[in-house]
Amino acid sequence: GRPIDDVAREFGLAPATIVKIASNENPLGCSPKVSQALTALASGVNLYPDFDCYELTHALAAANGVEPAQVLPAAGSSEIIQLVARAFLEPGRAAIIPQYSFQAYIGAAMSVGAQGLFVPAQDFAVDLDALLDAVTERTTVLFLASPNNPTGTLIAPDALDRFVDALPEHVLLVIDDAYCEYVEPALRFDSVAALRRRRNLLVMRTFSKIHGLAGLRVGYALGDPDLLGVLRRLQVPFSVSAAAQVAAVAALADTAFAERSRIENAQERARLALELTRRDIAFLPSAGNFLLLHVGAGAELADRLMRQGVIVRPVDGYGLQEWLRVSIGLPAETDRFLAALDEVHAAARQ
Ligand code: PLP
C-alpha cells in the first residue's frame, strides 16, 4: 500500500485524516515495551549493532524450542526470500510458487534469472497435489505461505504435514509463517515440529505483522544450521539494526500484546465479514489480518477510496483484477472504509 504521506500529497488531504488498511500492518501499533526499549536505545545509536544478534537469536531459540544455531535473524522475511533466491536459484533452476501468493517470491526468483513456476490454485486455495506434480529435477525451491497473502486461505495442518513429508528432498521447502500468529491455536501448523522431520526446510517469520514492527524491518528464519550458514554468508553485514534487535526482543517478550492483537483481529475480521455480507459483497475465508473482497473492478475502486482518504490494496498485480485486499484495522478504520465504500456505491447508482 502507498504511504500515507504520499497519498496526502497527491490528493491534498491531511495525513491525520487518512486511513491505511493496505499493508497488513498491526493497527494496535506495537507493544509499549518496544517503545521503552527504543527510547533506552536512543543514546547508543552511535554504536554498530551486535553483528550476531546474540540476544535476539537466543530469545527466538527459547521461544521456539530450538537451538540458537537454528535461528537466523534478518531484515524482515523479505531479506530471507532474497537470500534464498541468491543461494539456491540461478538460470536453469526453478522455484515453484503457488498462484496468488506473495509477489516477492517471483521477484526474487526472477532477480537471479531463475524460472518462477506458478502452479494454479484450486478455488483460490493452494493445490498441494498440483505443487507436488510440478516438481522436476530443476526445482530447487518451493515457497508456501499459510495463511497465504493475498487470499488469506489456510492450509489444513494435517495436509501440510503430509506435504512436508511427500515433497522430494532435493527441493528446499520455504514455509512462510508471516501470518501464523493470527491463526487460532487449534488450527495452527507446527512448523517447528516439521523442522525435526525434514532437513531441507526453512521456516520464515516476521515481526512486521502481529508484533507491529513493520517499519523496523526484522524477521527470522528457522532451519538447519548448515542451511542457515549458507544464507548468513550472503547477508549484508549488520542488516538487522540495533533498533530492530532491541525492539524484536521486547516484542517477543510481550506475549500478552500479541495475544490481544490476535483476538482483536479475529473480532474485527468477523465484524467486517458481517458488514460485507450485509452488503452482498463476497470475500474469501481468511485466517490472516486481511480479507480479499470480490468487488468487480478492484483497482478502480481502490482509487475511488483513496480519493476519500482510505488506502486499501488493489491486487491486479496478482491477476486478481476483480478483487481488493483490505487489512483488518481498528473498528473506526473499518467504519471509515465501509462509509467510503457505501458512498462510492451510492454515487455509482446515481
Ligand atoms: N511473507 C508474506 C506472505 C507477506 O505477506 C509479507 C508482507 O506483507 C512478507 C512475507 C514480508 O514481510 P517482512 O516485512 O518481514 O519483509
Image (cartoon, rainbow, N blue to C red):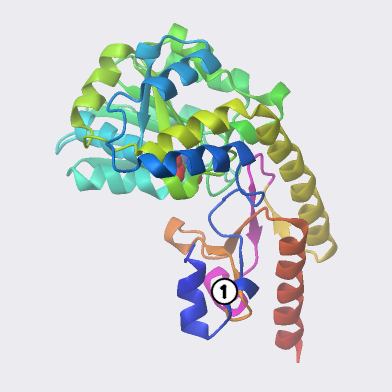
Find residue 297 and report its image quarter: bottom right
The residue singled out by tag 1 in the image is: 15
The reply to whether residue 133 is visible in this rendering is yes
Stretch in magenta = 285-306
- Left or right? Give the position of 308 relative to 197: right
- Left or right? Give the position of 201 relative to 307: left
Instruction: Name the one closer to the observer, 196 or 154.
Output: 196
Instruction: Name the one closer to the observer, 158 or 255.
Output: 255
Spot occupied by residue 259 in the image (x, y as percentages of width and height): 70, 32
> What residue is drawn where x is 51% and y is 34%?
127
Spot occupied by residue 197 in the image (x, y as percentages of width and height): 45, 7
Find residue 235 and report its image quarter: top left
- Residue type, mark 1 in image: Pro
Residue 298 magenta: yes
Q: In what element is the residue under mark 1?
A: helix
The reply to whether residue 218 is visible in this rendering is no
